[in-house]
C-alpha cells in the first residue's frame, strides 16, 4: 500500500485524533487519502498498521483517541470488563463493539462500531486505568449481568456470573498471592449493590454473590466447584494451606476440611515436564500432611454419555479413599 513521503514519525502507532494528526503536520485532506483509515468520527489510524491481536489491546487502541473526542464518556459493559481483566468467557471477550456510557447532559455518541449508553454515572463508578476512563468493577458486572445475548438469553449464564464475581473479590491469606488486594472486596461490592439497588442487573448480581467465594484463582476453579456442588458434593473451602515436615507447602484449589481432601484443578501449563515434577512433589506433600489429592482437568467437567462428568467420579473416589484412611 503506498505511503506518502510526508508521513510523520511522531504519529502514534495506536488510533489518533484529527487534532493529533494536525499537530503532527497531517492535513484533513491527507487523512482522507489511502494511507489512513477513518475509525470513527475524528479518529483515525494508519492504513498499513496491524491491529492488536488481544481483545483488550484492540479496545485500548481505539479508546485512547476516542475518549479525547468524547470527554464525558467511560468504557463500560464488556469493554470495561476487558480492561479490568474480568473473568469473561472467550466468546464474550471476542465481542467487537466498543461500549461507551456518557454521563451528564447530552446524547450518547452515534458512531459505527460503538455500542451507545447514557445515564447516571457517579464519580464512585468512574475509574481510570492506563489513561482510560472506565466503569468500576461492580458497575461493570451489573451492566454485563443485564445484557442479552443471541436469542434473548442472558449474555452470561448464572454460573459464568459467579466466576466473574469470584475474580472481582479474589484475595488470599496464604500462598504467593497473600496480601494482594482484591479488585473490589466483598464488603464494598455489597455496598455498591445497595447504592445501585434500582439498576437492571443488580438482582442477578446479588444472587450470584451468594454463591461467590473469596480465594478462587480462575474461572476453571469456579466451574469445578459449582459442578461438584450441583452433584451434591459441597462443603469446599478456599485459601487453605497444608504443611508437612520436610515437604513443600501445598495450597489446594478446593479443600474439604472434614474429609481432608485436596482438589487441584489443573490448567494446560501442567503438561510441561517441569510442572509434572512439581505436581508429583505436591502430591507427596499432600499425602504426608494426611490428605488425599484429587486432580481434575477441564475435560473432566464434560458429561460422559449423559452421565455425571468425570470430575464427579474423581471426587467421589477421593472421598472413599479418605474414609478408608480414617483410623
Image (cartoon, grey):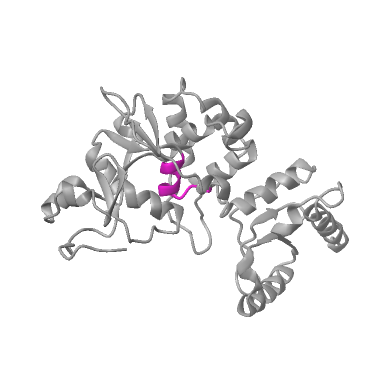
- Secondary structure mostly taken by the magenta-highlighted segment of the chain: helix
Where residue 34 appears, as percent x and y from the top left, is 28, 55
Q: What is the residue that sits farthest to the top in this orientation?
A: 198
Task: Give the answer, above or below, for where 165 lies relative to 278.
Answer: above
Q: Is residue 31 left or right of residue 84?
A: left
Q: Quadrant of the C terminus?
A: bottom right
User: Residue 79 in magenta?
Assistant: yes
Q: Is residue 326 left or right of residue 7?
A: right
The answer, for residue 305, to whether it is visible in the render is yes
Where residue 206 appears, as percent x and y from the top left, is 55, 30
Q: Between residues 114 and 234, which one lies in front from this camera angle?
A: 114
What residue is drawn where x is 58% and y is 45%? 163
Q: Quadrant of the N terminus?
A: bottom left
What residue is drawn where x is 11% and y is 52%? 23
Q: Is residue 47 left or right of residue 89?
A: left
What residue is drawn where x is 46% and y is 41%? 78
Q: Quadrant of residue 97?
A: top left
Q: Between residues 307 and 168, which one lies in front from this camera angle?
A: 307
Where residue 129 appears, as percent x and y from the top left, is 32, 48
Task: Give the answer, above or below, for where 195 lies relative to 136.
Answer: above
Q: Count every numbered label the image shows and give the total.
A: 0
The answer, for residue 213, to whether it is visible in the render is no
Q: Is residue 311 left or right of residue 204?
A: right
Where residue 58 appears, as percent x and y from the top left, is 39, 52
Task: Give the answer, above or below, for where 321 lies relative to 195.
Answer: below
What residue is drawn where x is 25% and y is 36%? 70
User: Residue 211 in magenta?
Assistant: no
Q: Quadrant of residue 239?
A: bottom right
Q: Which residues are magenta?
A: 78-87
Amino acid at each position: 500500500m503506498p505511503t506518502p513521503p510526508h508521513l510523520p514519525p511522531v504519529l502514534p502507532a495506536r488510533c489518533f485524533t484529527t487534532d493529533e494528526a494536525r499537530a503532527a503536520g497531517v492535513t484533513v485532506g491527507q487523512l482522507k487519502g489511502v494511507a489512513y483509515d477513518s475509525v470513527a468520527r475524528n479518529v483515525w489510524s494508519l492504513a498499513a498498521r496491524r491491529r492488536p491481536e488481544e481483545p483488550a489491546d484492540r479496545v485500548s487502541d481505539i479508546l485512547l483517541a476516542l475518549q479525547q473526542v468524547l470527554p464525558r464518556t467511560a468504557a463500560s459493559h464488556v469493554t470495561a470488563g476487558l480492561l479490568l481483566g474480568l473473568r469473561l468467557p472467550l466468546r464474550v471477550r471476542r465481542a467487537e463493539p466498543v461500549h461507551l456510557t456518557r454521563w451528564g447532559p447530552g446524547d450518547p455518541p452515534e458512531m459505527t462500531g460503538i455500542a451507545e449508553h447514557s445515564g447516571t454515572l457517579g464519580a464512585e463508578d468512574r475509574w481510570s486505568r492506563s489513561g482510560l476512563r472506565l466503569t468500576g468493577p461492580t458497575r461493570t458486572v451489573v451492566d454485563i449481568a443485564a445484557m442479552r445475548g443471541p436469542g434473548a438469553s442472558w449474555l452470561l449464564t448464572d454460573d459464568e456470573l459467579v466466576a466473574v464475581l469470584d475474580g472481582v473479590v479474589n484475595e488470599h491469606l496464604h500462598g504467593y498471592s497473600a496480601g494482594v488486594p482484591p479488585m473490589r472486596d466483598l464488603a464494598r461490592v455489597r455496598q455498591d449493590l445497595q447504592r445501585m439497588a434500582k439498576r437492571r442487573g443488580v438482582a442477578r448480581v446479588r444472587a450470584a454473590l451468594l454463591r461467590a467465594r473469596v480465594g478462587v484463582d480462575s474461572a476453571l476453579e469456579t466451574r469445578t466447584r459449582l459442578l461438584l456442588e450441583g452433584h451434591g458434593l459441597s462443603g469446599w473451602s478456599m485459601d487453605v494451606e497444608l504443611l508437612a515436615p520436610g515437604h513443600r507447602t501445598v495450597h489446594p484449589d478446593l479443600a474439604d476440611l472434614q474429609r481432608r481432601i485436596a482438589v487441584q484443578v489443573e490448567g494446560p501449563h501442567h503438561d510441561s515436564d517441569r510442572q509434572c515434577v512439581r505436581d508429583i512433589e505436591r502430591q507427596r506433600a499432600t499425602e504426608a500432611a494426611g490428605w488425599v489429592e484429587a486432580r481434575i482437568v477441564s475435560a473432566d467437567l464434560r458429561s460422559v454419555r449423559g452421565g455425571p462428568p468425570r470430575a464427579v467420579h474423581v471426587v467421589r473416589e477421593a472421598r472413599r479413599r479418605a474414609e478408608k484412611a480414617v483410623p
